[in-house]
Amino acid sequence: MEQDSKITAESPGGIKTVYYKSIDSTNTQAKRLLKEGKKPPFLVVAGQQTAGRGRQGKSFFSPDKTGIYMSLVIEEDKNTDFVKMTAAAAVSVCMAIEALTDKKPEIKWVNDIFLDEKKICGILCESVIDGNSSVPVIIGIGLNVTTSQFPDGLENAGSLSAAVSHSALTGEITKNLLRLSKSDISAFIDYYRNRSMLIGKEIVFFENGKECEALAVGIDENCALTVKTKSGEIKKLSSGEITVRQK
């Protein structure tokens, strides 16, 4: 782990930023820094991740200098709604992309950003339980900016492919996320709905280990995905893995 101390400074959001040329995972390093006594809020950024992590134990390919790999650490109530926090992060990324490029990304509920039907960004929110009434929440974001080569098995991966400054995009995401993480979900739910790539599409979701087919019909005020099963039953999904059904 080699820290480039010259980029340890105030972020555009006014919080301390710690930069590493290469790190195993910005979320993992954020946990280390918390254990060492560093207090939120702070931002961990890396030029490369050697063991980037996603939800459900998946890895996130993070080659050198082609993506944004960041973890924002903030203090939240111990009852933080992680679906809401993940949605806030997704909106923050999309808003930043739209502000700095001509791209129009879409959100795959609940934690992925797509562009031209390819995944360009993943989000992983974690907390550190310490017995207090408030807990550090780590919001990890991996965004492929110019990544062009992907390992076998990542056929659905893509890139933003835009001439945009990594530091400017990181700063815009951070600024948005600091604001939206403290906002009520009503402040951004309409934007989230308008960017959804699932509404009106047939999807597959898993419930108690069983694969189920349904039609995605909407996103409710708590950011749960509302679906209609083949039997006509309406269900609200608040977590779990879903995929768009292949035609």
Image (tube, helix red, strand yellow):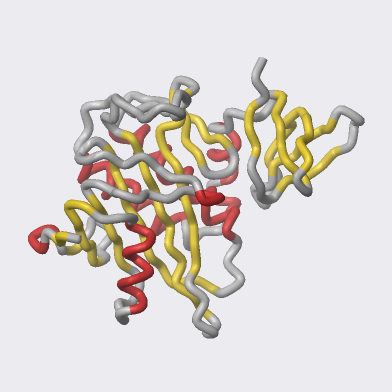
Dividing the picture into quadrants, the one containing residue 150 is: top left
Q: Is residue 20 above or below residue 195?
A: below
Dividing the picture into quadrants, the one containing residue 103 is: top left
Residue 147, how many percent across, how many down? 29, 30
Q: Residue furthest top?
A: 247
Q: Quadrant of the N terminus?
A: bottom left
Residue drawn 24% across the image and 52% down it = 46
> For this view, does 195 lie left or right of residue 218?
left
Residue 239, how many percent across, how many down? 66, 50
Residue drawn 49% across the image and 62% down it = 126
> For this view, does 149 lie left or right of residue 109?
left
> For this view, does 217 lie left or right of residue 41?
right
Nearer to us in this view, 86 or 152: 152
Q: Residue furthest left?
A: 6
Q: Is residue 240 above or below residue 128?
A: above
Dividing the picture into quadrants, the one containing residue 217 is: top right
Residue drawn 19% across the image and 57% down it = 20
Q: Is residue 169 above or below residue 176?
A: above
Nearer to us in this view, 242 or 94: 242
Residue drawn 44% across the image and 29% down it = 154
Residue 49, how many percent across, how many down? 29, 49
